């Protein structure tokens, strides 16, 4: 039930309950959720509060309204995690392979040095670095930079165990509107060589990723360093960016 004494607004409490019911399968994709009148009666709140809760989930893409029919759980289309190779990691997990992430540099707000293609050069931005491992083998390093204003407070989240795109969608209610990726083969030096457990002569796939949002262009920038000696990385051409990997 809802807690009127909680500092969390009632509509947000109800939205969290509905979202949990969707995740648990109580309301599967395509299912109609109770009307706002029914929700108001069930939880002892006004209809405007119930509408605020459902509207929040509509904005997050969890629910969809159909005029004259009601509000339904959206049937999720296949979607690729544009923020990292989370889609790639999921493909390994489906094969029963253990995937872990380690934070190499905790998220912090800092002034970004002026080098390379980083759109945040000479500006403040949130920066972090993390390492992904498959079956205890290092696979890729991600150096990620985020817009300081749009993602204020992002440093309070654990980005080792959660998808960045999920956090941005669920807590900042934003999704990328587009972007681009640049690819090249290069070689590493310094700490990255040790973290990826490669030599300075090992070819590495380097991806530079720019993500745009309605609120700002290049709001997220990432540099990905992917091992190519054990895995094949491929990108499907289509309406959205897609990436998948397979064991050689």
Image (cartoon, rainbow, N blue to C red):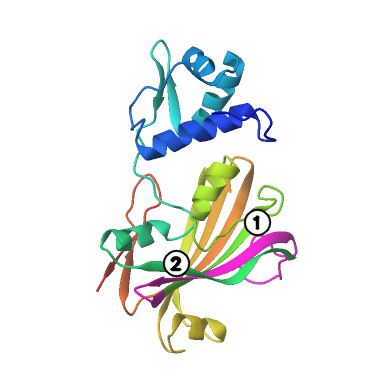
Q: Which residue is mark 2?
A: 183
Q: Is residue 15 left or right of residue 232?
A: right
Q: Is residue 52 left or right of residue 135?
A: right
Q: Is residue 130 above or below residue 159?
A: below
Read off the magenta span. 111-138
**Of 17 and 151, which appears nearest the observer?**
17
Q: Which residue is mark 1?
A: 156
**Rendered location of residue 87, percent (x, y):** 38, 56
Look at discs 1 and 2 and give the one toward the viewer. 1
Instruction: Name the quadrant containing residue 48.
Output: top right
**Rendered location of residue 179, percent (x, y):** 51, 51
Give the residue furthest to the top.
68
For the C terminus, give its image quadrant.
bottom left
**Rendered location of residue 139, percent (x, y):** 40, 73
For the N terminus, give its image quadrant.
top right
Query: Residue at 52% of width from left, 14% of height from top?
Result: 41
Q: Earlier in the sequence, mark 1 or mark 2?
A: 1
């Amino acid at each position: 039930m809802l807690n009127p004494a909680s500092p969390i607004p009632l509509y947000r409490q109800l939205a969290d309950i509905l979202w949990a019911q969707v995740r648990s399968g109580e309301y599967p994709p395509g299912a109609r959720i109770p009307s706002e009148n029914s929700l108001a009666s069930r939880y002892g709140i006004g209809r405007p509060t119930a509408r605020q809760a459902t509207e929040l989930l509509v904005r997050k893409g969890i629910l969809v309204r159909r005029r004259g029919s009601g509000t339904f759980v959206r049937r999720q289309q296949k979607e690729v995690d544009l923020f990292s190779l989370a889609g790639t990691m999921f493909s390994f997990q489906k094969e029963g392979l253990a995937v872990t992430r380690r934070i190499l540099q905790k998220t912090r707000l800092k002034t970004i040095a002026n080098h390379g293609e980083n759109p945040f050069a000479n500006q403040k931005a949130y920066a972090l670095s993390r390492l992904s491992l498959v079956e205890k083998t290092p696979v890729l390093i991600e150096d990620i930079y985020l817009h300081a204003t749009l993602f204020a407070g992002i440093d309070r989240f654990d980005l080792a165990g959660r998808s960045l795109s999920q956090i941005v969608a669920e807590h900042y209610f934003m999704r990328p509107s587009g972007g681009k990726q640049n690819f090249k083969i290069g070689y590493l030096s310094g700490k990255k060589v040790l973290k990826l457990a490669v030599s300075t002569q090992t070819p590495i796939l380097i991806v530079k990723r720019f993500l745009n949002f309605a609120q700002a262009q290049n709001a997220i920038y990432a540099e990905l360093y992917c091992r190519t000696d054990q895995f094949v990385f491929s990108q499907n051409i289509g309406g959205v960016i897609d990436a998948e990997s397979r064991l050689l």
